[in-house]
């Protein structure tokens, strides 16, 4: 490796990896995982030559990869410190933790935070408010100041960042060479394709095809993307959910939804909390779709979540496969639409309700 290339990689490593490691440490509290994610993010970003697009792009790419990877980590199962605030912190979704770290520890501009998380400004406001609300029981009256002070203490207590190695530099250089070679090959293919496409275009100009009225259906509207972002914050922790049992899966899940519905109507907050899946941002008392009576309700639909369901898209296949969609109807059949419906899942604590909003509403 040339000395100039080595100096460039060393400088990049010292600039970005400690920052990424501190960010991962605050989000996860797990030193080996944080070191692995920081180094992997730098390796992938530098290997794909993201540094040529500017320092902001490189840093955003690394932080984004850390957020994506931490969403699949079972942090609570590995860490039992007795710190109630830390346990509540680790129960938050990874995107929420990342947003709070960037806002209250790094004090990054909210628009920049939204760019890193690839979400709208409204979604970022929702992430922040929901995160503070879930942490509120463990924070002082000045919740934002307390959270910033707590994150600062955790940042000061962070272990040292992983050190660079010659092997890692070689891996990055090899990946950059592969990237350059692949780009050059694609350029040649595109050039060849452009020549062929020009000939096809000239042929079509002489013999234009018949007009088609078929509309494009593959485009995702900004409204639907924002809706999916909102729904993803209500997804339960996949590590808490068990595979659905074979026998009695529908009656037992439906019975839990009926009990939950009646508890909401009676104002029985204790039973609502007992039947709610605690790892999900919802449901909460007073924020539920429900029937207006505790009698005259019959469950006519308790089925597995369809792959076309918006919650299945927002939460992922594993959560969808381990959940039921329970719909309640009037026993007398005076309505063809459900009066209320809930998503329920099977956990070690039994059947638990984790959402009650109509995705298509």
Image: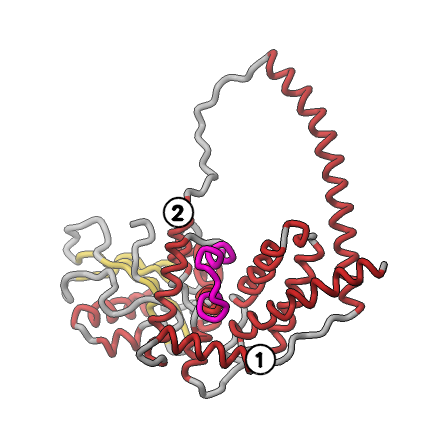
Give residue 13's quadrant in the image.
bottom right
Q: Circle 2: is it few (<14), some (14-19), or many (20+) Cα within 10 Å?
A: few
Q: Residue at x 75, y 62 (%)?
A: 9
Question: Where's residue 319, x and y in %?
Answer: 45, 63
Q: Decide which of tag 1 and tag 2 comes sooner along the chain.
A: 1
- How far apart in space, not on screen, are marks 1 and 2 (Cα)? 39 Å
Residue 313: mark in rendering: none
Quadrant where the N terminus sits is bottom right
Image coordinates of residue 199 in percent, x first then y, are 69, 19
Residue at the far top in the pictured view: 206
Is residue 153 shown above or below 115?
Answer: below
- In front of the other: 128 or 56: 56
Q: Which residue is mark 2?
A: 224
At 63% from the left edge and 77% from the top edge, which residue is drawn?
32
Q: Which residues are magenta?
A: 102-117
Side of 120 where 17 appears, left or right? right
Structure colour scheme: secondary structure
Q: Where 317 sits versus 136, above or below?
A: above
The reply to whether dot 1 and dot 2 touch (C-beta < 8 Å) is no
* In the image, residue 353 above or below residue 80: above
Residue 100 located left or right of residue 44: left
Q: Position of residue 163 (x, y in %)?
A: 72, 74
């Amino acid at each position: 490796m040339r000395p100039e290339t080595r100096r460039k990689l060393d400088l990049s490593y010292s600039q970005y990896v400690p920052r990424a490691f501190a960010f991962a440490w605050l989000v996860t509290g797990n030193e080996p995982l944080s070191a692995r994610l920081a180094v992997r993010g730098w390796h992938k970003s530098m290997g794909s030559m993201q540094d040529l697009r500017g320092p902001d792009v490189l840093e955003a790419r690394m932080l984004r990869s850390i957020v994506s990877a931490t969403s699949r980590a079972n942090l609570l199962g590995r860490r039992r410190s007795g710190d109630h605030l830390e346990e509540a912190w680790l129960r938050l979704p990874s995107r929420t933790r990342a947003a709070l770290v960037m806002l209250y520890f790094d004090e990054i501009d909210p628009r920049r935070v939204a760019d890193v998380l690839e979400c709208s400004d409204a979604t970022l406001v929702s992430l922040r408010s929901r995160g503070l609300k879930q942490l509120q029981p463990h924070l002082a009256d000045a919740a934002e100041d307390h959270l910033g002070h707590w994150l600062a203490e955790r940042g000061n207590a962070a272990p040292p960042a992983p050190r660079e190695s010659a092997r890692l530099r070689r891996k990055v250089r090899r990946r950059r060479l592969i990237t350059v070679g692949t780009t050059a090959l694609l350029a040649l293919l595109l050039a060849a394709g452009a020549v062929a496409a020009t000939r096809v275009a000239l042929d079509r100009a002489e013999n234009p095809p018949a007009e088609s009225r078929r509309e494009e259906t593959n485009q995702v509207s900004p409204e639907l993307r924002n809706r999916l972002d909102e729904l993803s914050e209500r997804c339960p922790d996949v590590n808490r959910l068990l595979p659905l049992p074979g026998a009695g899966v529908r009656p037992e899940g439906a019975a839990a939804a009926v009990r939950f519905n009646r508890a909401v109507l009676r104002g029985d907050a204790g039973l609502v909390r007992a039947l709610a899946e605690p790892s999900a941002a919802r449901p909460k008392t007073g924020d539920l779709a429900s029937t207006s009576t505790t009698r005259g309700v019959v469950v006519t639909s308790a089925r597995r979540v369809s792959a076309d369901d918006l919650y299945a898209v927002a939460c992922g296949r594993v959560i969808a496969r381990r959940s039921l969609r329970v719909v309640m109807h009037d026993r007398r059949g005076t309505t063809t639409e459900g009066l209320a419906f809930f998503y329920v899942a099977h956990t070690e604590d039994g059947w638990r309700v984790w959402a009650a909003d109509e995705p298509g509403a």
